[in-house]
């Protein structure tokens, strides 16, 4: 499966944006039926997305997801009936406040997969953790279904639920971000960050993305094609990191053959955890061979 660094939101109500979706360069294209669609246009957007999804399939370039409406809206079931099919890789599930919500949606998907001749479990889920309740229960939510590809922290909804103001620097989000990253890694799924909404400030986007990678996030949602290149670059190990990881693996494995549990490399002690981290980095690069060649 493609290593997901960038997840590009595409408004499901816009034929023009849908047509351009395959050209964004994102690892995952997420057609949106939720926040970018006005309540009066939900039905129109659903039919447009149902008709358009087969034209967006590019299995060698990106994963194809749809952000459906939340279970509490009464729209989720109709959304799933419209979009679940052989072309769909997964759904982005908003307002996943409790594990039971994810399990219920998992059940819906299994029924539709069986009815439509699809392998059960084909359609993956990325739930949005976007309330105080969800942040506190993030680990259980992330363990609630084997369908989870990852989980995303919904910064705007979370701060609204907390009755606090969202600042650009996002200091008020730091605890939730660390909690989310830890919960996702404990559950064995990827942590994804919410999009940075100021599409003009690419410098701050890069700064924020680098911080999120440093605390354990694997990727970030985007709301404009200009953000994709930055996010891909930040969440892809650099050539220098790749070369260092290769040296670490080579040195450690040579030491292991000589019966040593730790080795010295360029003035550093390389033990098992450092080796394991280097191996994981190289595996992530193998999933994106073209991007790994970037400087």
Image (tube, helix red, strand yellow):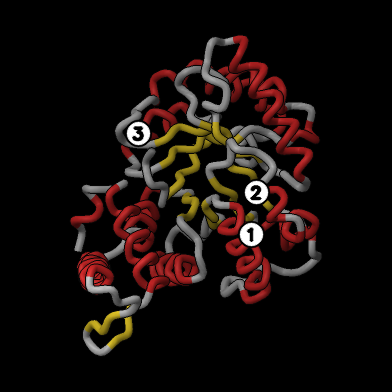
User: Which residue is most to the bottom?
Assistant: 267
> Mark 3 or mark 1, which is nearer to you?
1
- Tell me: residue 77, above or below residue 223: above
Residue drawn at point x = 68 percent, y = 55 percent: 139
What x and y, as percent, mark residue 244? 24, 72
The number of callouts visible is: 3
Residue drawn at point x = 36 percent, y = 63 percent: 234
Q: Quadrant of the C terminus?
A: bottom left
What x and y, as percent, mark residue 141? 70, 48
> Which is nearer the N-term, disc 3 or disc 1?
3
What x and y, as percent, mark residue 276? 38, 65
> Mark 2 or mark 3, which is nearer to you?
2
Separation of marks 3 and 1 at Cα, in angstroms? 32 Å
**Viewer-proximal residue, 195 or 42?**
195
Q: Which mark is residue 22?
A: 3
The residue at which mark 2 appears reads as 142
């Amino acid at each position: 499966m493609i290593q997901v660094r960038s997840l590009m939101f595409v408004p499901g109500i816009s034929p023009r944006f849908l047509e351009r979706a395959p050209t964004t360069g994102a690892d995952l294209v997420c057609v949106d039926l939720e926040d970018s669609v006005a309540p009066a246009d939900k039905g129109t957007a659903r039919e447009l997305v149902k008709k358009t999804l087969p034209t967006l399939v590019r299995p060698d370039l990106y994963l194809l997801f749809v952000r459906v409406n939340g279970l509490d809206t009464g729209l989720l079931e109709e959304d799933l009936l419209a979009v679940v099919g052989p072309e769909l890789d997964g759904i982005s599930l908003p307002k996943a406040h409790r594990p039971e919500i994810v399990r219920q949606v998992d059940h819906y998907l299994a029924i539709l997969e069986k009815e439509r001749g699809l392998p059960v479990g084909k359609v993956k889920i990325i739930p949005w953790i976007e309330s105080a309740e969800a942040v506190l229960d993030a680990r259980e939510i992330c363990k609630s279904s084997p369908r989870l590809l990852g989980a995303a922290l919904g910064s705007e909804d979370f701060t609204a639920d907390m009755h606090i103001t969202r600042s650009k620097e996002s200091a008020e989000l730091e605890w939730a971000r660390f909690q989310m990253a830890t919960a996702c890694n404990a559950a064995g799924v990827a942590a994804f960050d919410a999009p940075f909404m100021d599409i003009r400030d690419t410098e701050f986007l890069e700064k924020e993305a680098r911080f999120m990678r440093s605390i354990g996030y694997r990727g970030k949602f985007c709301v404009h094609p200009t953000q994709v290149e930055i996010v891909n670059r930040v969440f892809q190990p650099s050539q220098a990191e790749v070369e260092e990881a290769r040296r670490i693996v080579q040195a450690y494995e040579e030491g292991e053959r000589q019966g040593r549990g730790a080795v010295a490399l360029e003035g550093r002690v390389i033990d098992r955890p450092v080796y394991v981290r280097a191996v994981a980095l190289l595996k992530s690069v193998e999933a994106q061979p073209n991007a790994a060649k970037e400087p």
